[in-house]
Amino acid sequence: MSSAIVILSGGLDSTTALYWAKKNFNKVFAITFYYGQRHSLEVEMARIIAKKAKVEEHILFEVDISKFGGSALTDKNLEVPETQSIEEIKERGIPITYVPFRNGIFLSIAAAYAETKNTTNLVGGWNAVDYSGYPDCRPEFLAAMEEALNKGTKLGSEGKSWKIHAPLINLTKGEIIKLGLSLGADYSYSISCYRGTEVPCGKCDSCVLRAKGWMEVGKEDHLIERLKREGKV
Amino acid sequence: MSSAIVILSGGLDSTTALYWAKKNFNKVFAITFYYGQRHSLEVEMARIIAKKAKVEEHILFEVDISKFGGSALTDKNLEVPETQSIEEIKERGIPITYVPFRNGIFLSIAAAYAETKNTTNLVGGWNAVDYSGYPDCRPEFLAAMEEALNKGTKLGSEGKSWKIHAPLINLTKGEIIKLGLSLGADYSYSISCYRGTEVPCGKCDSCVLRAKGWMEVGKEDHLIERLKREGKV
């Protein structure tokens, strides 16, 4: 019986990762972090998404890294910047929306959860193509974390190998959506906007990248379809 | 201006690490975790210890990994075992008091705190000699975590090297106490008992190891001295 823990933020990428995990493992558990993010509505959405995907268990975990500040995603005094273009996202350095070591924290906590479920499979929607340039989304980081887990856990010291599955790491946003659609993913409740509103601002990195993805696919975003149905846009 | 973050549990080892950091860095910040531990009194003690050591700032951070269970330190339904001897501690495998990936979680969160203080120095009281056999206390784990931090953080990707300082890693418990005493450490408020009581049970791994340490030093434990003064033993 294979099993895995999916780190589910409630955004488009992690929703795709969840459906990928459902196809590749018999038992899928999901964990969502409330970390003091501006866009905490995504936590509510994650609950709906996990329920629709019929996971074994969905844990909502609170780890309030916003108390350290330093990121526009957690500090309401900092402005989420508007994005000029896809090129700008790719060329500039690490943006103000970087949350210090967020994925390291999430992976560590997910690994603790995994150990109690006796699995060494972690799955997430990390992407290093159409992304905001965060260092903790890169394959070399995920490989280093695997090694830390192999050395620092009971299961690792018993000889089990940790595997951090990042099925989206080399896909464009359009390819991610295509993969998800082929797996039956429903994106109606997945929200991505850094400003944290259900109706996307359309101007932050995350909205710009998501719109580019659906454009590549040539379909209307499930989320926009739902918002139209509900008269919200 | 050198600076460092100390992970301070309020036990004997991390108190020593704190005094070591005070000697080796100009600015010392401390972080203590409330993780749903049975012995949460140590959090209160950590507050006193940090205050006495005059740190720049002391953060109390809540990350409730007890919700996953699986350890006698966080699950009150599991019994903290009595220890037969030092030899038994060294020979058996990973005990029931192991908390899944606790140090990985603590290091990840401490690193996020460090990034907002613009430092890549982390200090802790990890020890791989007189210890309970936890995998996340070993030097190979700490080295792997350094690499994960170098790859997964903004400071790391800017070329700064993370350093996880483990000044006690190869010391016996007696040597740890001697080091602390030479640095002016006050152990009156540092508590170690896995059962979490101020008056040590004397029977768990942690009490047995601590008693061995003071025996090696040939002095009475500061904690016992204080408890006697206060009429608690």
Image (cartoon, coloured by chain):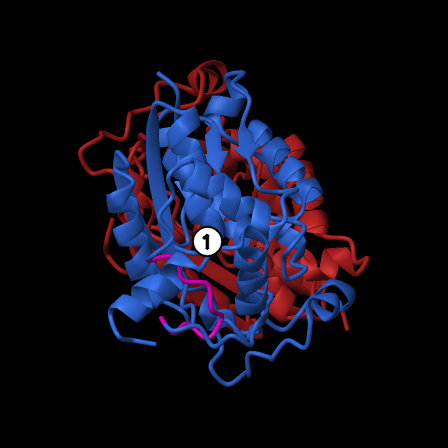
Chain colours: A red, B blue
B128 vs B41, left or right, is: right
Q: Quick check: is B195 in the magenta stretch?
A: yes
- Would residue B68 be found to the left or right of residue B7 on screen? right
Residue B192 falls left or right of residue B78: left
| x and y percentages locating residue A84 in the rendered image | 35, 18
- The residue carrying mark 1 is B12
Compared with residue B197, is residue B104 higher up or lower down, i.e. above or below?
above
Q: Residue at x 79, y 58 (%)?
A: A160
Q: Which percent across, then down, holds residue B112?
A: 41, 37
Extent of the magenta region: B189-198
Q: In the image, is residue B22 above or below residue B189?
A: above
Q: Secondary structure at mark 1?
A: helix
Identify which residue is drawn at 56% across, 56% down.
B213
Residue in view at x 33 percent, y 52 percent? B61
* On-image quarter of the N terminus of chain A: bottom right
Q: Position of residue A62 (x, y in %)?
A: 37, 59
Q: Residue furthest front?
A: B218
Give the residue furthest to the left: A77
A81 or A138, which lies in front? Answer: A138
Q: Is residue A215 above or below residue A225?
A: above
> In screen coordinates, is B135 left or right of A70?
right
Whether residue A52 is visible: yes
